[in-house]
Image (spheres, rainbow, N blue to C red):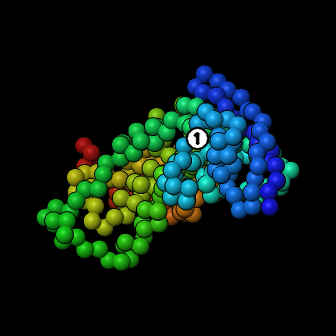
């Protein structure tokens, strides 16, 4: 079964742009990306759109559909009424390059700021052993496909460009949490307290647990409950633990 769908798509570049209306054929079982491809093939040949896998695994086709950050390839047309106008816009938190394509280099810059895994001293890679329980604790974080929808939706940067230098965003705070939970990470032995740097350097304190990041994550990762809140608790524990407080005062002298 087919019908004519009403679409409003943002067209433009870094200099500016506008929403343009289109009528495009929609077929049963299609997703928003199918329709965008048909629009590109039949009416707007130079429409810029980033995509790769069409299976929800590469994280490339992130955009906003009716104002909600989504993967276009995983958004079924059947969730919209046939007479509804479906509006497709680029991710709002990042600078537009052209049409639906944004410059997401902010995220790569944030990734580079996080010190990587520190191998345990005295162990060669083949000698690493981890309990399944420890593996399981951070396994869900490794499902991340780096679509950056969580980064796009978090109000700390979505509406406040000025916060970007100080805030790594949920995806990268989650990365710090993952490393902090890693039983073999020897960062602490080099003097690096990952949870504390999340707070002091990467802006964990900006997060007020709105959970919007968790709501838009296509991998259903419990970013807030399983990564951010435990890390907040750890830093709060340290801050209010009188022994830690005393130790800090003595050893910082
Ligand atoms: Fe995307 Fe989820 Fe990874 Fe954020 S945590 S980048 S929403 S997959
Ligand atoms: Fe932002 Fe997620 Fe915290 S949306 S405010 S990082 S809970
Ligand atoms: Fe790969 Fe959508 S095209 S996630």
The quarter of the picture where the C terminus appears is top left
Q: Position of residue 148 (x, y in %)?
A: 52, 48
Tell me if residue 142 comes above or below residue 32 in the rendering: below
* Residue at image coords 31%, 67%: 183
Q: Is residue 37 visible?
A: yes
Q: Position of residue 210 (x, y in %)?
A: 63, 53
Residue 179 lies left or right of residue 31; in this view the side is left
Q: Secondary structure at mark 1?
A: loop
The residue indicated by pointer 1 is 49
Q: Residue at x 35, y 47 (%)?
A: 114
Quadrant containing the N terminus in the rendered view: bottom right
Instruction: Say if residue 93 shows up in the picture.
Output: no
Q: Residue furthest right?
A: 83
| Residue 247 vertical placement versus 93 (above, below) | below
Q: Assess mark 1: CB under 8 A from ligand 3?
A: no
Give the side of residue 90 with respect to residue 112, left or right. right
Which of the 4 image quadrants contains residue 73? Answer: bottom right
């Amino acid at each position: 079964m087919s019908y004519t769908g009403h679409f409003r798509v943002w067209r433009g570049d870094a200099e500016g742009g506008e929403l343009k209306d289109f009528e495009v054929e929609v077929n049963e079982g299609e997703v928003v990306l199918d329709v965008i491809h048909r629009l590109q093939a039949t009416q707007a040949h130079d429409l810029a759109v980033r995509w790769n896998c069409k299976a929800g695994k590469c994280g490339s086709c992130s955009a906003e559909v009716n104002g909600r950050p989504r993967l276009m390839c995983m958004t079924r047309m059947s969730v919209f009424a046939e007479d509804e106008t479906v509006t497709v816009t680029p991710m709002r938190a990042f600078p537009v390059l052209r049409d639906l394509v944004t410059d997401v280099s902010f995220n790569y810059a944030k990734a580079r700021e996080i010190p990587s895994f520190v191998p345990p001293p005295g162990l060669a890679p083949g000698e690493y052993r981890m309990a399944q329980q420890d593996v399981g604790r951070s396994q869900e974080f490794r499902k991340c496909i780096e679509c950056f929808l969580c980064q796009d939706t978090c109000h700390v940067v979505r509406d406040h460009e000025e916060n970007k230098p100080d805030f790594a965003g949920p995806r990268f705070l989650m990365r710090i949490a993952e490393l902090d939970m890693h039983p073999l990470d020897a960062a602490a032995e080099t003097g690096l307290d990952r949870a504390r740097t999340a707070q002091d350097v990467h802006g964990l304190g900006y997060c007020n647990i709105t959970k919007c990041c968790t709501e838009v994550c296509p991998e259903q990762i419990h970013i807030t409950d399983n990564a951010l809140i435990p890390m907040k608790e750890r830093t709060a524990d340290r801050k209010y633990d009188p022994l830690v407080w005393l130790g800090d005062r003595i050893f910082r002298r």
